[in-house]
Amino acid sequence: MRKHVGVLLVVLLGAAFLLGQKQVAPKADAAKIREHVKYLSSDLLEGRGTGQKGGDDAADYIAGQFKSYGLKPAGENGTYFQDVPMVGIKTQPETTFNFVPKDGQSVALKLFDDFVTSNGTQVPSVDIDAPIVFVGYGITAPEYQWDDYKGYDLKGKVALLFVNEPISEDPKFFKGKALTYYGRWTYKFEETARRGAVATLIIHRTDLASYGWEVVRNSWGGEASRLKLDGTPKLEAASWIQLDVAKKLAAMGGQDLDKLFQQAQSREFRPIELPVRLKAHVVSSVRPFSSRNVLAMAEGSDAKGRNAEAVLYTAHYDHFGIDKSKPGGNNIYHGAIDNGTGCGILLEMARLWAGSKPAPPRSILFAAVTAEEQGLLGSEYLGKHAAALPVRPILDLNYDALAPLGIPEEVEVSGAERTTFYPAVEKIAKEFGLAIKPDAHQEAGHYYRSDHFSLSRVGIPSFSISEGLKFKGHDLAWGDAQAKDYVDNRYHKPADMFREDWDFAGLAKMVEFGYALGGAAAVAPEPVRWLPGDEFEKAGGK
Ligand SMILES: [Zn+2]
């Protein structure tokens, strides 16, 4: 009986909170968002590079804002900061790869033309001499009854595999056309390393990767940042090889690459050991440094337990910094949209929640994360250390690169439909006059390319909030043209700069929408969960 009274009370309080919310739903201030974006993308902050002064200055600015709103520090040792230990790694030109067949001539590969590689074990020099095994797609996915390994022991071997996942139109099998995490190259390196491989060679096929060899070559040429080793298994040579090189390798092993690809489509596939060894010498420069996530919170009002849980808002503050190899004047990657806008939204969200009285039962946590552009590293660290946070996140709402183009009439919340929270999202979107826009390019796997994914993979229901393409006073074609112009001319270029003619009213609306979502999750009796059977449902169990 008492229990029922308690439940009733909670429901009433929840309803009262919601009603109270409705009456005093705070207004986001577009001018404040504009100010943050303008400052963070100015030359002063030097493109907010990870491991560079500008990135550190951005973190200090965000912490200062959090403090000025009266939010509590939620970082380490009573500060707003969580230290993220990292290393910068660059593969050196002395690095060599040779394919050595059991009989016949060995073949030497050319770095960057034929292969790219990175030593994940973070040591300056390593030698590899190990047999090469074709493992199909290299996937183990019990929920699709798929296992490319069939008990095969990869320990001490070199895995050769295709990027992407088995071809499917069936939504129940690897989500049909949509790319699941199993298809991403990051998964391939992680899974083979878990299985004890020393090296992995991903076969680059432009159609499967959805980008050309030039993209691989460019993005693997410079110094890459990684989280400092933390016990997660790593490969000594995480590599891509060019398609023609893979064909040659298959032929050296008495196989035909196209036939291997066909065999990889079958559930019955078994690993095929090639009579060819990889002899490699991998030389790397290794530079330790540290970066910071910025964390703050507003404490929940439910002293009986729900205040130990939190709705988390995230946005990455880093961008590419200064490229010193380019001439001055045009070498700062300003990152105004990517992700000055997300930071502006996060800060305005934090200001609203700091002033919200009464506080909702659950706490509200804010994290401006570092090193997203280096491979979601700051959020990965945050997710891996979620247990050390003062409150336990039950939902992450992420903001990454929203265009200040006026009032949106659509919203993208891809991933929300995979959680128990979706009915609330649908209801609130409707109240805001926002049509939910489905992911137009599921095969590109966008869900796995922003910070919310780092939280998903440790079991926390997470998604990004973004505008669609339809803006008030414009047709879809206009929005489409704006998006295309951004991708073609400014995305990840110095030209991603602040513009005085931008209209921030839409970003204020995105704050209010996210505030309403967070409010609903913060008062709900039960935490948000992944739907049964989702690929992340059991991820939080460990
Ligand atoms: Zn970016």
Image: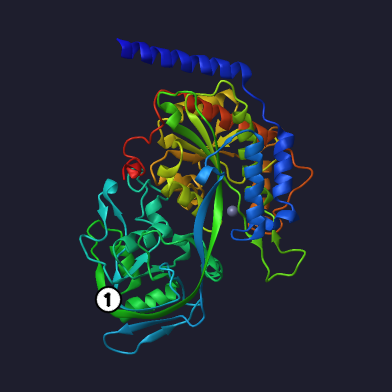
Tell me the quarter of the image containing the C terminus: top left
Q: Is residue 107 visible?
A: yes
Residue 30 located left or right of residue 87: right
Label 1 CB-ligand 1 distance < 8 A: no
User: Where does residue 147 sit, x and y in percent of width and height?
Assistant: 26, 56
Residue at label 1?
274
Outermost residue, front side = 77
Residue occupying image coordinates x 42% and y 49% = 384
Q: Secondary structure at mark 1?
A: strand
Count the numbered circles shown: 1
Residue occupying image coordinates x 44% and y 24% = 303
In the image, residue 42 sits, relative to residue 205, either above or below, namely above
> 417 or 200, which lies in front?
200
Label 1: how many residues lie within 10 Å, few (<14), some (14-19) or many (20+)? many
User: Where does residue 80 sit, x and y in percent of width and height?
Assistant: 57, 44
Residue 256 located left or right of residue 358: left
> 157 or 489, which lies in front?
157
